[in-house]
C-alpha cells in the first residue's frame, strides 16, 4: 500500500512540476513586464531597464526557454530564500509566500473541512430522503449555492453584515483584512482573527458544501440500490443501520477522490475571497501578479498552489486506500 | 396437518409506473412446511424473486403489497422494519444471486458473518463471534478458514463468495432459507459445489429451503416440491417427480420439452415454445399463457383460470383444460409436438479439407498494473497452444468454464491476423500471409454471432442497417443491400417489414435472430457462434438452436460453436473440444466423448451438469471438483489440471509424480485426443463413492 | 472551466451512462408485450421516452422557463427601455431603480438596465459557444483515445492529467493580455480549450466499455473502419452524455467569463458583460446595493436555471437516478 501511494505521489509530483514549468513558459510568453518601465518621465534608459529585467530573470530579450531554464536552475541551486527569485516589488518570492501562506491556508483549510462535513451530511440526507420535501429544499439550496461564485457570495455577505452592524449599532462583524492591526494580547488577537474569518469562511464553506452534497447525493443514491445493503438487511440490520454502516461507508470511497478534485476549485474560490475581503494572502498575490505582469510572483504562486494540490491529491489517495480495501494491493 | 412454517396467501405486488402499474405478483398462494425443500421455477419476469423479497420484507418502498404472509403464525406484512429485522437473519435468511455485489466490499468476510451474529445477540463477545465465523466458514468448505476469515470479498472467487453468503445465512440457525438463483452466475462445476453446500446447510440447520431458479435441472436434483410461476402467478405446484413426469399445465409441459437434456440430446430435436411472456403492465384478458399455448381455446382468452387442486396428491394446476390433461385425453406430445428429426450424415472420410484449421494457436496477454506508468507484471495464458479443425458443413463445439479461453480462441479466429505462435488456416489460406485487401475480402467468409442479444446489436440503428452493415464494408450498392436484408430476415424467421424498426422493439430471441441475419448476409463459410443462446430464456433457446441447425444444413455452413452448456453442444455439434486453462484437454467426435469421456475434467464437467429429470438426478454419480480453476497467469509445472483432478488422489504415488512434473500432450485414444497421462486409469473414478470426493469438509 | 464541480471520472462511481435503455426504461416502453398484441403494439423509441420522462421533471421545467425568460429579456428587453447602451443621464446619478431607470443608474448616470441586456447577451453568447466547443473536443478526443487505446490513450491521459493539475484559472489569466488585445471570440476559444478534459475522460471510459460491446466488435470483425465505427456506433451512444455536458458546460463557461471579467481580465470596456457589471457594482455594493445585487441576481438565476435543466436531463436520460430504492 505504501508503495502504491508512493507511486501515485511521484506521478503527481511529475505532473505538478510539468504544470508549473508550463505556467512559467506561458507567463513569460504573454507577460510584458517591460511596459512597466516604458513611457516614464523622465524616460529610463534602455540599458537600465534591461539590467533591471535581467536581474529579475525576466528580460524579454532572452529567449523564453532560456529564462525558463534559468528559473529551474535557480530553484535547484539557490539557497531557499532565493529559490523563486524576486517579484517586481523586489521582495523575495519565497519570503512573500511564507508571510502570506498562513493567511490563505487558514481560510482554505477551515473552509474546506467545514464544506466536506456539511456536504457529506446533506448529500447522504438528501439521498436517503429522496424526493421528500427536505431533499427538495436541500437540492434547490445547493443548486443556488453552486451557482453563486464566491466573489458574489462574499459581497452579499458583506452587505448583510454591514446591515447587521448598522442595525445593532456596533462593529460586531469586522470583515476587512485578515485581522485588525493594533490589537494586542493572545486572546483578543485570536478572537479578532476568528471574527475576520467568519464571512469568507461561510462563503467558501457554503459554496464547497453545495458541490459536495450534490455529488455525495448521487453516489449515495447509487449505493442505496446496491445488493449489499439488501444483504445487510436480510441479516437483520434495520434500514437505518444498513444505510449508515454499509451504505455511507461505501459511498465515502468515491468522495475521497472528489475532495482532491474539488480542492482546486476551492483554491481559486478562496483567491477571489481574498481579494473581496482584502486579505494579504496567496490568492491576492497571484491575481495582483497577473494584473502587474509579474512573472516571478505568478510562478511562485502557481508553484505554491500546485504543491497544495499535490499534497491534497496525495492525501486523497491515502484516504482512498484507507477507505477501499480493493486498492490496497 | 401441522401448521406450515411459512404461508403466503393471495399475495400481490405491484410497482406504480407512469404507463400503468406493473403487476409483478398477482395473487400467489403457497406454503412451506418445516424441513421442506421447495423449488420455485420461472423465467425472467415471472415474479418469482419479487414474491420472495416480499416474504423477507425487502421490496423497495414503492412496491404496493397486499395479501397475507404468515411465518409461524405471525403475520409479516403488518410488521415494521424493526420487528422484521428481528426475524430476518435469525428466523429467515436469504441468499442472493450475485455474490460479488451482495457482500459489502469494505468489510472482511469475517466481519460480515460476525455482524449477522451480533445483530441478533448483542451479548456475544467479539472473540466468540469470530470463532463462530471461522467455524461457519469451515462448514461451508472454505479452506484455511482461520486465514480466509480476514479476507475481503474481492479476494474470494465467485464460488467462495457464495459459500460465504451461505455461511451468513446459516449463522443464526434459521428455520427458513430462501435462495434466489444462488448458482446462476457460477460455472457448472462451481454450481455443483454450491448446491452441495446448500444441501449441507439445510442438514446442519434443519431449515426449510426455498430455492428460486430458472433452471429445471437444478430443481430436479434438489427439491421435494416444485411451484411453477408464470406472469406473476403460480400455474402449477406439486411433488417434483410428478411435475417432471406428468406436467399438467401446458406452460410446464412446454418448458420441460424445450429444455435440452445432456443425456438424450442430439438424438431428437428441441421443442420450441414460441412467443414471450406478457407485459405485466398491460396484461391481456384471460389466461396470460393463452397467446403462447397451442391448446388454447376461446374460454382461455376470456377468463384467467384459478389455481385449483386437481386430485388427492396435493397437486394444483391453473388451466381450463387441466381435467382433460389429467385424464390423458390431451397429451403433452400433442400440444408441443417434437419437430421431425433427420439423422445427419456425418462425413466420415477426412479427405475434405477443413474450413478452419488451427495448430498450436497461442494468445497471451501481458498483465499490466498502474495507470500512468504501466508495467507488465505477468502473462495471462488465455490460449496456450490449441489444435482444432472445423470441417465443411460441420460443427465444432468448444466447451469450457469461464476463463478457459474458449471465447478468446474464437475471437483469435475472427482477427484473421497471424497468431502469436502456431498457425491458423481459413479456407485453405494461411491468415498470416494475407494482404490487407485479401483479409478484408476474407472477412466475408468468417462471421460471428455473439452471446448477449442486448449488446450484440446497436440500439441506435434500425434493424435494416444493422443487418446490412457487413455489406457496407464491401461496397455493395444500396438496392442490393435492401434486397439481401429482406432475404436474410425472411431466412431467420423475421418479417422483412420490420427492417425499419429499432432493436428495442424486439425480444431477446428475435434480436439474436437479427444477429444471425447480419452474420449470414455476406454468405460466409464459417460462423463463429460465441455462446449464442446462453443469455436467452430456456423457452426461447430451443427455437434459436433449431434455427441454427436448419441454417447449417440448408446453407452448408460450418460452425465454431462456443458454449458452456454441454447439453446444447451435444445437441448441435459433431465434434467437441473441451478446454481447460487455455488448453484443449479432450477432442473428439461428440458421440464418443459423451459416451465415454476419457479426461477426468470432462468427466467432472459432465457429471456436474444437472439433468432435468429427478429420477436420473437421484441416481447419478457426481464428481465434485475441489476448489477453483487456477488463474491463467499462474505458472504451473506439470499438468495444469492436477490441482483439482479427482483422479490423481486415486493413483499410486509414482503416477501422481508424473502428473505434477510432466505436462501431458494430447494423445489419440480411440477417436479422441486426450491430454492426460492416465487415460487407462479413468475407470477408477467410477468405483469411488461420490461422497468421498466431497469438497465440503465436516465441521 | 475550473469553477463548477464536476465529478472525477476514473473511480468507482457510475456516471449516468447512455448505453442501453435499462430494464425500467424498457418496462415503461412496454417492451415485453404479449405476442397477441405484438403486431399492433409498437414500443416507443428512446428519444420519445427520454422526452416523456423529461416532461415529468419539475426541475427541468423550472430551469427551462427561467432560461427562456432570461434569453427573451436579453434579446428584447431593451425594446422597453428609452436609454441606449452606455448613454449617460446627466439628471440622475446613482438613481435607485424606478420607472425612469428600471435598474437604477451608476455614479455617472449610466442606465443599468441597458447595460444589463447587453451584458446578458454577451455572457449567453459566450456560454452557448464555448460549451459546445468544449463538448465537441471532448467527444472527439475522448472517443478516439478510448477506441485506439495504447499509446494514443496514454498520451491523452498525460495531457488531460496535466491540464487538470494546472490551475486553469491562472492559465486563463495569463493569456488574458491576448484576450484584451483581440476580440471576445478568443475568450470563447480559450474557455473551450480548457473545458474539455473531464468530459473527454468520461467519454474515453465510456468508449472503452462500448468498444467491448459486441456490436462494436462485430463491426470491427466485419472490417468496418475506425472512424466509421466511432461515427456510427460510439458517438451516438454517448450522445446524451454529451448533451448533459454541453448544458452544464454553458454554466461553467458563463462562470469562467464572469470571473475573468470581474478581475478585469476578460471582457474589457467599452464591452460589458456580467463580470464587468459585477466588478463595477462591488465597490458600491454597500451604499448602492442595486448596482451589485441586480447583476448578481441575474448571474445566479441564470446559472441555477442551467444547472436545473442539466439535472433534469440527467435524471431523464439515466433512469437509474430515478429508481425508487430500498
Image (tube, rainbow, N blue to C red):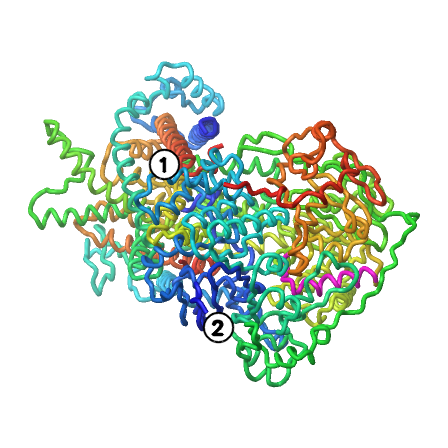
Horizontal side, residue A81 vs residue C236: left or right: left
- The answer for which chain carries disc 2 is B
Q: Is residue B680 magenta?
A: no
Question: Which quadrant of the view contains residue C311?
Answer: bottom left
Residue lying farthest left? A169
Pointer 1 chain = B
Above or below for B632 versus B470: above
Give the image location of residue C324, x and y in percent. 41, 61
Viewer-proximal residue among B20 and B185:
B185
Q: Quadrant of the C terminus of chain C?
A: bottom left
Q: Position of residue B416 (x, y in %)?
A: 77, 44
Residue B574 % position (x, y):
81, 53
Q: Nearer the viewer, residue C150 or A132?
A: A132
Q: Secondary structure at mark 1?
A: helix
Q: Is residue C118 visible?
A: no
Total residue callouts: 2
| Other residues around mark 1 within 10 Å, as few (<14) / some (14–19) / many (≥20) | few
Q: Position of residue A151 (x, y in %)?
A: 28, 44
Chief secondary structure of the magenta portion: helix
Image check: C324 left or right of B555?
left
Give the residue at mark 1.
B127
Residue range corresponding to the magenta coloring: B535-553
For image coordinates 52% across by 70% down, the residue present is B232
- Locate the N terminus of chain C and report the quarter of the image it occupies: top left
From the viewer's perspective, is residue B679 above or below residue B25?
above
Q: Which residue is mark 2?
A: B26
Q: Earlier in the sequence, mark 1 or mark 2?
A: 2
For this rendering, which residue is in front, B141 or B339?
B141
Q: Is residue B541 magenta?
A: yes
Q: Closer to us: mark 1 or mark 2? A: 1
Circle 2 SS class: strand
Amino acid at each position: 500500500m505504501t508503495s502504491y501511494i508512493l507511486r501515485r505521489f511521484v506521478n503527481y509530483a511529475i505532473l505538478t512540476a510539468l504544470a508549473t514549468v508550463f505556467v512559467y513558459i506561458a507567463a513569460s510568453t504573454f507577460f510584458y513586464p517591460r511596459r512597466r518601465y516604458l513611457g516614464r518621465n523622465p524616460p529610463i534608459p534602455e540599458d537600465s531597464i534591461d539590467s533591471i529585467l535581467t536581474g529579475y530573470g525576466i528580460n524579454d530579450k532572452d529567449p523564453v526557454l532560456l529564462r525558463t531554464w534559468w528559473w529551474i536552475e535557480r530553484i535547484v541551486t539557490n539557497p531557499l530564500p532565493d529559490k523563486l527569485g524576486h517579484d517586481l516589488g523586489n521582495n523575495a518570492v519565497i519570503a512573500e509566500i511564507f508571510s502570506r501562506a498562513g493567511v490563505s491556508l487558514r481560510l482554505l483549510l477551515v473552509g474546506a473541512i467545514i464544506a466536506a462535513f456539511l456536504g457529506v451530511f446533506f448529500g447522504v440526507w438528501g439521498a436517503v430522503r429522496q424526493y421528500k420535501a427536505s431533499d427538495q429544499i436541500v437540492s434547490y439550496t445547493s443548486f443556488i449555492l453552486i451557482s453563486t461564485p464566491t466573489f458574489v457570495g462574499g459581497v452579499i455577505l458583506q452587505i448583510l453584515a454591514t446591515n447587521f452592524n448598522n442595525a445593532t449599532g456596533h462593529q460586531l462583524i469586522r470583515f476587512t483584512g485578515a485581522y485588525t492591526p493594533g490589537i494586542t494580547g493572545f486572546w483578543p488577537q485570536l478572537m479578532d482573527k476568528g471574527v475576520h474569518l467568519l464571512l469568507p469562511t461561510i462563503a467558501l464553506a457554503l459554496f464547497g458544501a453545495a458541490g459536495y452534497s450534490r455529488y455525495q447525493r448521487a453516489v449515495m443514491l447509487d449505493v442505496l440500490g446496491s445488493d449489499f445493503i439488501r444483504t445487510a438487511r436480510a441479516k437483520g440490520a434495520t434500514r437505518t443501520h444498513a444505510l449508515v454502516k454499509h451504505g455511507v461507508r461505501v459511498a465515502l470511497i468515491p468522495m475521497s477522490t472528489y475532495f482532491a478534485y474539488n480542492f482546486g476549485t476551492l483554491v481559486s474560490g478562496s483567491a477571489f475571497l481574498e481579494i473581496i475581503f482584502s486579505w494579504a494572502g496567496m490568492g491576492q498575490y497571484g491575481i495582483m501578479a497577473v494584473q502587474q505582469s509579474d512573472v516571478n510572483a505568478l510562478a511562485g504562486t502557481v508553484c505554491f498552489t500546485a504543491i497544495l494540490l499535490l499534497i491534497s491529491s496525495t492525501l486523497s489517495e491515502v484516504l482512498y486506500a484507507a477507505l477501499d480495501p480493493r486498492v490496497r494491493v | 396437518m401441522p401448521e406450515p412454517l411459512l404461508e403466503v396467501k393471495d399475495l400481490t405486488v405491484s410497482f406504480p409506473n407512469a404507463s400503468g402499474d406493473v403487476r409483478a405478483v398477482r395473487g400467489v398462494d403457497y406454503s412451506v412446511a418445516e424441513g421442506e425443500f421447495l423449488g420455485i421455477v420461472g423465467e425472467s419476469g415471472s415474479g418469482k424473486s419479487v414474491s420472495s423479497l416480499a416474504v423477507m420484507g425487502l421490496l423497495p418502498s414503492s412496491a404496493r403489497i397486499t395479501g397475507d404472509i404468515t411465518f409461524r403464525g405471525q403475520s409479516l406484512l403488518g410488521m415494521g422494519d424493526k420487528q422484521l429485522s428481528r426475524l430476518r437473519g435469525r428466523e429467515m435468511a436469504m441468499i442472493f444471486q450475485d455474490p460479488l455485489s451482495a457482500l459489502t466490499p469494505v468489510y472482511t468476510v469475517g466481519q460480515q458473518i460476525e455482524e449477522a451474529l451480533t445483530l441478533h445477540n448483542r451479548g456475544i463477545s467479539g472473540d466468540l463471534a469470530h470463532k463462530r465465523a471461522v467455524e461457519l466458514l469451515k462448514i461451508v468448505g472454505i479452506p484455511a478458514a482461520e486465514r480466509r476469515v480476514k479476507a475481503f470479498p474481492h479476494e474470494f472467487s465467485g464460488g467462495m463468495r457464495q459459500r460465504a453468503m451461505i455461511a451468513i445465512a446459516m449463522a443464526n440457525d434459521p428455520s427458513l432459507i430462501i435462495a434466489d438463483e444462488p448458482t446462476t452466475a457460477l460455472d457448472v462445476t462451481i454450481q455443483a459445489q454450491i448446491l452441495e453446500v446448500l444441501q449441507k446447510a439445510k442438514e446442519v440447520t434443519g431449515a426449510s429451503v426455498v430455492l428460486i431458479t430458472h433452471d429445471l435441472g437444478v430443481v430436479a436434483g434438489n427439491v421435494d416440491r416444485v411451484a411453477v410461476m408464470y406472469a406473476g402467478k403460480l400455474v402449477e405446484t406439486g411433488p417434483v417427480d410428478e411435475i417432471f413426469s406428468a406436467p399438467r399445465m401446458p406452460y410446464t409441459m412446454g418448458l420441460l420439452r424445450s429444455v435440452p437434456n445432456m443425456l438424450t440430446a442430439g438424438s431428437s430435436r428441441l421443442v420450441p415454445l414460441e412467443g414471450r411472456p406478457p407485459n405485466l403492465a398491460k396484461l391481456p384478458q384471460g389466461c396470460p399463457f393463452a397467446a403462447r399455448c397451442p391448446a388454447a381455446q376461446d374460454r382461455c382468452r376470456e377468463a384467467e383460470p384459478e389455481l385449483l387442486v386437481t386430485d388427492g396428491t396435493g397437486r394444483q394446476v391453473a388451466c381450463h383444460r387441466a381435467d382433460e390433461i389429467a385424464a390423458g385425453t390431451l397429451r403433452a406430445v400433442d400440444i408441443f409436438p417434437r419437430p421431425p428429426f433427420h439423422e445427419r450424415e456425418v462425413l466420415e472420410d477426412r479427405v475434405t479439407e477443413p474450413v478452419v484449421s488451427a495448430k498450436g494457436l497461442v494468445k497471451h496477454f501481458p498483465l499490466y498494473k498502474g495507470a500512468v506508468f504501466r508495467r507488465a507484471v505477468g502473462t495471462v495464458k488465455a490460449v496456450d497452444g490449441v489444435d482444432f479443425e472445423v470441417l465443411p458443413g460441420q460443427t465444432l463445439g468448444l466447451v469450457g468454464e469461464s476463463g478457459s479461453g474458449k471465447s478468446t480462441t474464437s475471437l483469435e479466429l475472427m482477427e484473421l491476423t497471424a497468431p502469436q505462435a502456431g498457425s491458423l488456416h481459413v479456407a485453405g489460406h494461411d491468415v498470416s500471409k494475407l494482404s490487407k485487401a485479401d483479409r478484408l475480402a476474407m472477412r466475408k467468409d468468417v462471421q460471428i454471432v455473439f452471446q448477449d442479444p442486448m449488446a450484440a446489436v446497436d440500439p441506435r440503428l434500425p434493424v435494416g442497417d444493422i443487418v446490412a452493415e457487413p455489406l457496407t464494408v464491401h461496397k455493395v450498392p444500396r438496392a442490393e443491400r435492401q434486397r439481401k436484408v429482406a432475404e436474410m430476415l425472411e431466412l431467420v424467421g423475421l418479417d422483412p417489414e420490420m427492417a425499419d424498426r429499432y432493436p428495442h422493439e424486439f425480444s431477446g430471441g428475435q434480436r439474436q435472430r437479427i444477429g444471425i441475419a447480419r452474420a449470414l448476409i455476406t454468405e460466409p463459410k464459417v460462423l463463429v457462434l460465441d455462446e449464442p443462446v446462453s443469455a436467452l430464456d430456456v423457452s426461447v433457446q430451443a427455437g434459436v438452436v433449431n434455427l441454427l441447425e436448419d441454417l447449417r444444413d440448408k446453407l452448408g455452413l460450418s460452425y465454431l460453436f462456443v458454449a458452456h452448456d454441454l447439453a446444447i453442444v451435444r445437441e448441435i455439434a459433431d465434434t467437441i473440444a473441451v478446454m481447460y486453462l487455455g488448453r484443449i484437454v479432450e477432442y473428439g467426435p461428440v458421440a464418443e466423448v459423451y459416451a465415454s469421456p476419457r479426461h477426468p475434467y470432462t468427466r467432472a464437467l459432465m457429471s456436474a451438469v444437472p439433468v432435468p429429470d429427478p429420477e436420473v438426478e437421484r441416481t447419478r454419480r457426481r464428481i465434485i471438483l475441489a476448489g477453483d480453476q487456477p488463474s491463467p497467469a499462474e505458472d504451473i509445472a506439470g499438468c495444469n489440471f492436477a490441482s483439482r483432478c479427482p483422479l490423481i488422489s486415486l493413483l499410486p504415488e509414482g503416477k501422481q509424480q508424473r502428473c505434477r512434473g510432466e505436462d501431458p500432450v494430447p494423445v489419440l485414444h480411440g477417436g479422441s485426443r486426450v491430454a492426460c497421462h492416465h487415460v487407462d486409469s479413468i475407470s477408477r473414478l467410477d468405483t469411488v463413492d461420490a461422497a468421498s470426493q466431497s469438497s465440503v469438509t465436516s465441521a | 472551466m475550473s469553477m463548477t464541480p464536476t465529478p472525477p471520472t476514473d473511480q468507482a462511481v457510475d456516471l449516468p451512462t447512455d448505453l442501453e435503455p435499462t430494464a425500467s426504461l424498457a418496462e415503461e416502453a412496454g417492451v415485453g408485450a404479449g405476442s397477441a398484441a405484438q403486431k399492433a403494439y409498437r414500443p416507443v423509441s428512446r428519444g420519445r421516452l427520454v422526452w416523456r420522462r423529461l416532461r415529468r421533471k419539475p426541475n427541468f421545467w423550472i430551469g427551462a422557463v427561467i432560461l427562456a425568460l432570461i434569453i427573451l429579456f436579453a434579446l428584447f428587453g431593451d425594446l422597453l427601455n428609452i436609454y441606449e447602451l452606455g448613454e449617460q443621464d446627466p439628471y440622475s446619478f446613482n438613481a435607485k431603480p424606478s420607472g425612469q431607470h428600471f435598474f437604477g443608474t451608476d455614479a455617472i448616470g449610466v442606465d443599468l438596465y441597458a447595460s444589463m441586456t447587453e451584458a446578458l447577451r454577451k455572457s449567453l453568447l459566450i456560454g452557448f459557444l464555448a460549451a459546445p466547443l468544449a463538448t465537441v473536443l471532448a467527444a472527439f478526443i475522448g472517443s478516439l483515445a478510448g477506441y485506439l487505446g495504447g499509446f494514443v490513450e496514454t498520451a491523452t491521459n498525460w495531457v488531460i492529467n496535466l491540464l487538470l493539475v494546472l490551475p486553469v484559472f491562472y492559465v486563463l489569466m495569463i493569456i488574458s493580455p491576448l484576450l484584451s488585445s483581440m476580440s471576445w471570440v478568443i475568450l470563447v476559444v480559450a474557455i473551450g480549450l480548457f473545458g474539455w478534459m473531464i468530459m473527454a475522460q468520461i467519454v474515453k471510459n465510456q468508449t472503452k466499455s462500448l468498444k467491448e460491446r459486441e456490436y462494436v466488435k462485430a463491426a470491427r470483425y466485419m472490417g468496418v473502419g475506425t472512424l466509421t465505427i466511432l461515427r456510427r456506433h460510439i458517438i451516438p451512444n454517448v450522445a446524451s452524455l454529451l448533451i448533459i455536458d454541453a448544458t452544464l458546460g454553458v454554466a461553467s463557461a458563463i462562470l469562467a467569463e464572469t470571473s475573468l471579467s470581474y478581475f478585469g481580465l476578460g471582457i474589457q470596456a467599452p464591452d460589458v458583460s456580467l463580470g464587468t457589471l459585477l466588478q463595477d457594482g462591488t465597490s458600491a455594493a454597500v451604499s448602492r446595493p442595486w448596482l451589485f445585487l441586480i447583476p448578481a441576481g441575474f448571474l445566479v438565476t441564470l446559472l441555477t436555471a442551467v444547472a436545473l435543466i442539466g439535472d433534469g436531463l440527467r435524471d431523464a436520460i439515466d433512469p437509474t437516478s430515478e429508481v425508487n430504492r430500498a
